[in-house]
Amino acid sequence: MTPPPVLRRVALLPQPGFSMLALAGVLDGLAAANELQDEVVWRAECLSVTGGLVMSGNGTAVQTAALPPQADWHAVFLVTADTGPCEPALATWLKRWAAEGRVLAGIDAGAAQLAACGLLDGQRACADWPLLDGLANEHPAVAWASGLWAISDEGRRLSCAGALASVDLCGAWLASLHGERFGQELAQWLGVQGLRPQDERQRAGYSERRGAGSPKLAEALALMEANLAEPLPTEDVAQLVGVSRRQLERLFKQHLDTLPSRHYLALRLARAQRLLQQSSQSILQIGLSCGFSSGPHFSNAYKSHFGHTPRDERSRRAQAWRTPALPGDSA
């Protein structure tokens, strides 16, 4: 007689501003697991400390139930875009679950909050790429990696970058439990060619895609992406890729219709905008980490590019968190 399937409960903890795409990746992976094998039934529940609506970064609200006093979670997925410490009540829960041996997963910036609780010391962990420099400074005991996802040796600490990386992490974790063949079937079920490996570089293909017409341009773009905190002078970028400054400027004008310095500034400001929206670092810290020499320098450049100041950007996020969307509202 075939034994009945084992029930394994998974707690999903979306935090304000979380990525709906990242949350959906985990839900899709668990749904696929229920379709592709009959040994385990995975039951996912969206929860928060007090319950209620939690708004994502795109304005869509998710209904959550309050965390119950007791629950036999097999795994807990913390889905957030904020690198700041989580609320004290949640930190208490996370430490308790860690002591009980539960699987803890940090999605997008979730690893940052696990690290703030001291739950990733000595572990390899991943987070969304614009956050890595700051996290390495704030949590030096964690081995931050620039890949897509990471699973600890004992399989009880999971982390990944944002968006679709959650699919790859969840798929790899489930494949470690259900077998390699399951991972292949999961990829087919999800309609993708295959799950991406953990060491695949985040944003891989950006430089190659933008510089597809010129290897030298692609190399220059990669250098800029790798040096956002301490921008390289255009002369240095040209020298490092083996062309003259004038040649480099011609390449940028031909393929991107801009100058190297302008494109470099746009990259730094895009990173600053993401940090303002998704991290709890101060405005000055963000400006300095994106290569601006002072607060006024950062503010003036930001306003010139986006039409509003970094402080206005932060205020918009705070206002959005205070007014969650209601079911049926347009996103």
Image (tube, rainbow, N blue to C red):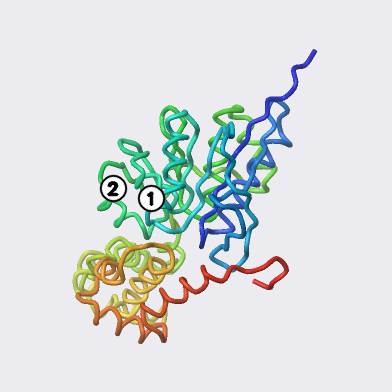
Residue 151 placed where, x, y %? Answer: 45, 36
Q: In the rendered view, tell whether residue 193 sits above or below residue 21.
A: above
Residue at 65% in and 39% down: 186
Question: Could you tell which of marks 1 and 2 lies nearer the N-terminus?
Answer: 1
Label 1 crowd bin: few (<14), some (14–19), many (20+), radius 10 Å: many
Q: Which residue is mark 1?
A: 112
**Side of 87 where 219 appears, left or right:** left
Asked whether 2 or 215 is in front, the reply is 2
Residue at 57% in and 67% down: 58
**Side of 63 where 233 appears, left or right:** left
- Circles 1 and 2: CB atoms closer than 8 Å: yes
Is disc 2 placed on a helix, strand or loop? loop
- State the CA–CA distance, disc 1 to disc 2: 8 Å
Label 2 crowd bin: few (<14), some (14–19), many (20+), radius 10 Å: some
Asked whether 100 or 3 is in front, the reply is 100
Amino acid on which the number 1 mark rests in the picture: Ala
Q: Which mark is residue 100?
A: none
Residue 127 placed where, x, y %? Answer: 41, 51
Is disc 1 placed on a helix, strand or loop? helix
Quarter of the image with the N terminus in it: top right
Residue 32 placed where, x, y %? Answer: 69, 40
Q: Which residue is mark 2?
A: 139
Quadrant assignment, res 172: top right
Amino acid on which the number 2 mark rests in the picture: His
Residue 153 placed where, x, y %? Answer: 41, 29
